[in-house]
Image (tube, helix red, strand yellow):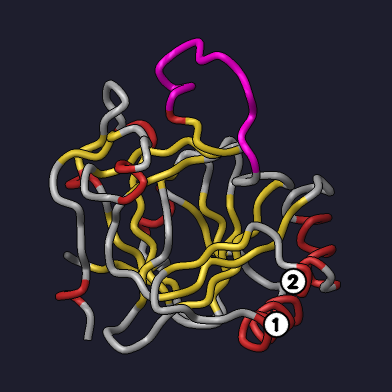
Amino acid sequence: MKILSVTDAEFTNYGRIIEGYEEEKKQIMETLQAKTPIPEGVDYVAEEKALQDLSASSKISNSLFGGSPMQFGWCNGHNTKLNCLEYHRSSEINLGATDFILLLAKREEIVDYKLDSSKVKAFLVPKGVMVEVYATALHYAPCQASKNSGFQVLVGLPQGTNVGMPQFTAGNQEDKLLTATNKWLLAHAEANEAKDGAWVGITGENIDISSDLI
């Protein structure tokens, strides 16, 4: 699979690089390195107190999210597979203390609540580059950027995202994709999430970039 860079023009269809915030990025990366593990699999924590308490987090909330309450967590580990794609009704902020790769597609490419994995593109996000992933971009767990390294990635989202599950009676098919607060999910049939009952909405190959890494 061709691995593009977030500096390539193609990335503007999915998100943007956030300029500035050098001191804030330094604080966040140091905290990720000091306070968060890199497991063999993939772990996600929606809100990490060590990140939440940073002055950097307050500044980002007040500027990038216009003062709306945000949660700062992390997604760390080792991963080379697509497995699922999700979207939110909001942008997501990512910043790596390591290089990492995002597998992305566009919500508009979903047809009848299905997406062919051939639509997915891979983007390398270098360590220290902060990106906004648009609400219109499908994404999921990051991938590692080399065979022998893991990843440590900040996940900044509106407060409550991915936490709990609202209780309601589904009124349409999209409602059946909701798996947590502000989280709509499409799973590949091979993914554990599908085995747990998530909507099987990814067709084609379950992308694995392991052979593309060095």
Against 201, residue 3 (above or below) is below
Q: Residue at x 27, y 84 (%)?
A: 147
Instruction: Check disc 2 and give the amino acid type.
Output: Leu
Q: Secondary structure at mark 1?
A: helix
Against 122, residue 213 (above or below) is below
Find the magenta span and give its range: 164-176
Give the label on residue 51, or none: 2
In the rendered image, the quadrant that contains the C terminus is bottom left
Q: Residue at x 36, y 52 (%)?
A: 104
Instruction: Check disc 1 and give the amino acid type.
Output: Thr
In the rendered image, the quadrant that contains the N terminus is bottom left
Q: Assess whether residue 36 is covered by the magenta stretch.
A: no
N-term-proximal mark, 2 vs 1: 1
- Label 1 crowding class (10 Å Cα cut-off): few <14, some 14-19, many 20+? some
Q: CA distance from mark 2 to mark 1?
A: 7 Å
Q: x, y (%) of residue 127?
A: 50, 81
Against 199, residue 10 (above or below) is below
Is 139 in front, or is 67?
139
Give the label on residue 31, or none: 1
Q: Assess whether residue 167 is covered by the magenta stretch.
A: yes
Q: x, y (%) of residue 146?
A: 30, 83
Task: Characterize the magenta stretch by its predominant secondary structure.
Answer: loop
